[in-house]
Amino acid sequence: MHRKSVTASGIVALLLVSSISAQDPEFKRIAVEDYRDKVYGSWLAQCIGNIYGLPHENRYIDEPGPDEFPYGYRRNLDALKRTNGVFSDDDTDIEYMYLLAMEQHGPEPSLAQLAAMWKYHVRNRVWLANRAAVAAMNHGFTPPFTGDKELNPHWFQIDPQLINEIWSVTAPGMVRYAAAKSGWAALIMDDDWGIEPTVYYGAMYAAAFFEPDAHKLIDIGVAALPAGSRFARTVSDMKALYQKHPEDWKAARREMADKYYHREPRESKTIWNANLNAAAGVLAQLYGDGDFQETLDLSCAMGFDADNQAATLAGLLGVILGRQGLPNDLLFPIREFNWTKPFNDFYKNVSRYDMPDAGLEDMADRMAAQGEKIILRHGGRRFSEGGREFYLINTESPFVPPLEFPSGPIPYMEVGQQVDYALPAFGGEAPLSWTVLRGDLPGNLRILEGTVSGVPSAPGVFPIALQLTAGNDQRISKALKLVVRGPNLARSARSVLSSVSKTDTARRDEMWLTVPHSLYADQVEVIRDGNRLGDGSTFYSIEDHGNPKLDFFGFEWSQPQRVGLMGYHTGAVEESGGWFTSLNVEYRDSDGNWKPVDGLLISPPLAPGPLPFNKPHFVEYLLAFRPVTTMAIRIIGDAGGADHWRSGRTNFTSISELSVHGPLPRYELLNR
């Protein structure tokens, strides 16, 4: 994996550099009670926007929603009645989870700690970039690998901009800190320009504690983006459309949709595209002009993944307005219920595993408590004046991510082939240095300036422990297993063996597909072309039927081969299928019969169960076993599939590469 993948995408790298540059502190003050009220207002408003927007989610694509405002809660009014309060959805539940992480680990948790929360609490109701990220976590990866554009084919989708407002709500006025921290957290599931709207919203939310003008906030958000930002250009376009059609939001929406949806490049043309949906949000903010109800309705009417814009923009205005500035008819929508507090002060968790129900006011107070910790940690203070309590806030404070040694793909090391592997490191302060604490590197390899390089001389499994030091006093250590393989015997095979040799593209294209089409390869021969990632890498074993079936992939040689290791590298997977639910290795004996190998060990173990939330894109499973001498070998197992809301189940597997190698000494160390 190259250096970019582990030191952050270009945008966050620029943000972090700018955030730690020396500047004179600029202090602002806010009354403690006012800060808490704004946090409470923002949290209530996000709940309003989420529930209000849900009936409009993904409904208005070619045309905007009708201008029959106000829309009202519609069918969700009955859901509010059944809940006797408000219920969780993906616009608020991950922020609640992040609050729990801050309470458990402190106000600046690591990405690895957040990933652990994802693995435990997120077990269903997850899609696109978030689903890909949590599947990678369940495979053993940690951010930023989980959002890396080479490993997560949904890196450009909307996911991060709707779940990261908490980092700014807990950093009032700290625009540079909030923007950088929001972009840092967005790396969990997105990359490159996919995280830019998250940074933009992060800056606006932090600024909104002191700046009430919705138009000025847009400029503050853009100022937080680096030069050359795609989304900065998009915002400029939206402002120009607003000037061109000051009284006709539908005309502006039509031109926006034409450019950023209909004419978007095929590989990123989805109704959940981060840039597209954020553009819709900019228009809603401009035409709403600070009016809560108008902005809320316009957010829905702009269409696409509308509930997310509704929740995020409502939350932004909630910061400005506070609790008392929010419309009571939206906070108390059920007249026959005798609620004494907004939404009966009840948040019902219906979407995340083992997260308790909570009181809305208490949740806001807990967020504000984390905000106080951040204010005090970053040069601010709390003081009394005239019988009131105030915060004095250092608005120029930087955000420096915690030092981490992230887990990602192990380097591909083959005897006789040059290795240049950049050790993964993220956060902390320069300089960074690595030390081998125990174990030995493979023969002929060394570490120089964070890169393992050389030409390995012999196969084997090499457990080592490394220490990473940042600056003068930050030290973390990590155990790794480096695997050196013998030459890849697949290259010399006479033929490829497979249950499906050519994808039924007609059936594939009838399915609900979510990954870019450029990833697809139609012929099985690609499983030995050396291309494990990216364009043309992924072969789907889709046939003209979707019934449960066995799939196999392997090779046949003209002469006997001594084999003890295979590497199965998945391609992209779909929400409805693309994985093995069981996996074995078989070889052809001297009588021409297929027999299972002995002592099979799969590292890491195959993800169990039929659900897609733990089926990762672009990962490798090493299959080691007692050596066999054979002229043919294959992996074989049950092709998986899942019921899907947009298409029926289709059982198939995904593969990008299958390598074959000689015996691996001490292969039992792989799972120790």
Image (tube, rainbow, N blue to C red):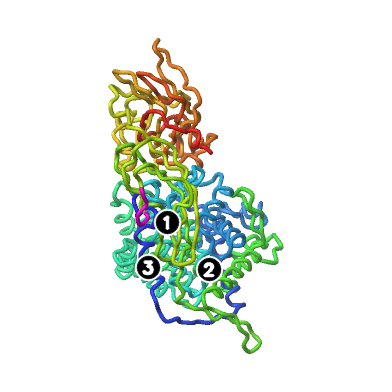
Q: Which residue is mark 1?
A: 434
Across and down, in percent, residue 515 comes to 37, 43
Residue type at numbered disc 1 = Trp
Across and down, in percent, residue 595 comes to 46, 17
Q: Which residue is mark 3?
A: 17
Q: Identify which residue, 340 or 513, lies in the foreground.
A: 513
Across and down, in percent, residue 68 comes to 47, 60
Is residue 268 visible from the viewing direction of this image?
Answer: yes
- Determine if the magenta segment contains residue 350: no
Say if 65 sits above or below 223 in the image: above
> Which residue is drawn at the image coordinates 52% and 56% (left, top)?
91
Q: Identify which residue, 369 or 304, lies in the foreground.
A: 369
Across and down, in percent, residue 234 comes to 32, 62
Q: Earlier in the sequence, mark 1 or mark 2?
A: 2
Label 2 sits on a secondary structure element that is helix
- In front: label 1 or label 2: 1
